Image: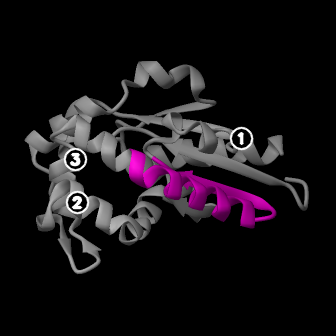
Amino acid sequence: MRPGTKAVIGVGGNIGTGKTTVSKMFAELGARYVSADEIGWEVLPEIVEELEAEFGKAIVSGRKVNKEKLREVVFTDGEKLRFLNRTSHPLLTRRIIGQVEAIRSGKVVIDAALLFDWPEVYDIVDYPILVRSKRELMLSRAKAKGISEKLFESIVSLQRNDEEVLGMASYVIENNGTMSELRTRCQLIYEEISHDC
């Protein structure tokens, strides 16, 4: 990689595919890590009044939003999810772009489930990566994080199908094997990107 150059890697994928694991593997290899999920929770206090007005007092405590309750509300009702997205995404995407632009050189990885749904974020990515997995593996990983099968099915039904975004990805990672196999795949991609820059 030439000194002073920057390469932006974007990692997207549905719930339970392992996109955060992949992103963190790139971070271990030297990329700066930007998490859309973490930034998303950070911006919620800025819109807490709108959320409380729309979803009720049950989802908030002071200026703090209860993640589990919010997740249950928005992922079982498409209209509520659209409201949350309309309200939070402009703040969220601006902050992601700001964080990436503040990094002047080296490699940056954006961990974003909705990478392929956000044109403004997708446009600053040099190497978009789609992480895929078999459905039973996605479910078991979601359950390990405390997400019920019913909620998992609701979330999947509201996310885009992999086939719709395949053509937008520079790389596709099939995450159905061991952690060692996944790490090897990430390392090969990282090396390719390094040689490309």
The answer to whether one can see residue 147 in this image is yes
Front one among 40 and 192: 40
* Residue 175 located left or right of residue 80: right
* Residue 102 located left or right of residue 34: right
Front one among 5 and 50: 50
For marks 3 and 2, the one nearer the N-term is 2
Dominant SS of magenta comes to helix
Q: Residue furthest bottom?
A: 62
Front one among 54 and 90: 54
Compared to residue 176, the image places residue 93 above or below, namely: below
Q: Which of marks 3 and 2 is in front?
A: 2
Residue 150, quarter of picture: top left
Q: What residue type is labelled 3?
A: Val
User: Do labels 1 and 2 touch, CB within 8 Å?
Assistant: no
User: Do labels 3 and 1 touch, CB within 8 Å?
Assistant: no
The answer to whether one can see residue 143 in this image is no
Disc 2: which residue:
53
For marks 1 and 2, the one nearer the N-term is 2
Cα distance, mark 1 to mark 2? 39 Å
Disc 3: which residue:
74
Cα distance, mark 3 to mark 2? 14 Å
Q: Which residue is at 51% across, 22% downward?
A: 166
Dot 1 lies on which element? loop
Compared to residue 94, the image places residue 18 above or below, namely: above
| Numbered range of the magenta stretch | 86-112
Q: What residue type is labelled 2?
A: Ala
For marks 3 and 1, the one nearer the N-term is 3
Count of numbered circles on the image: 3
Disc 1: which residue:
126
Few, some or many residues within 10 Å of mark 1 (<14, 14–19, 20+): some
Q: Which amino acid does label 1 sit on?
A: Asp
Residue 140 screen position, x and y as percent = 18, 45
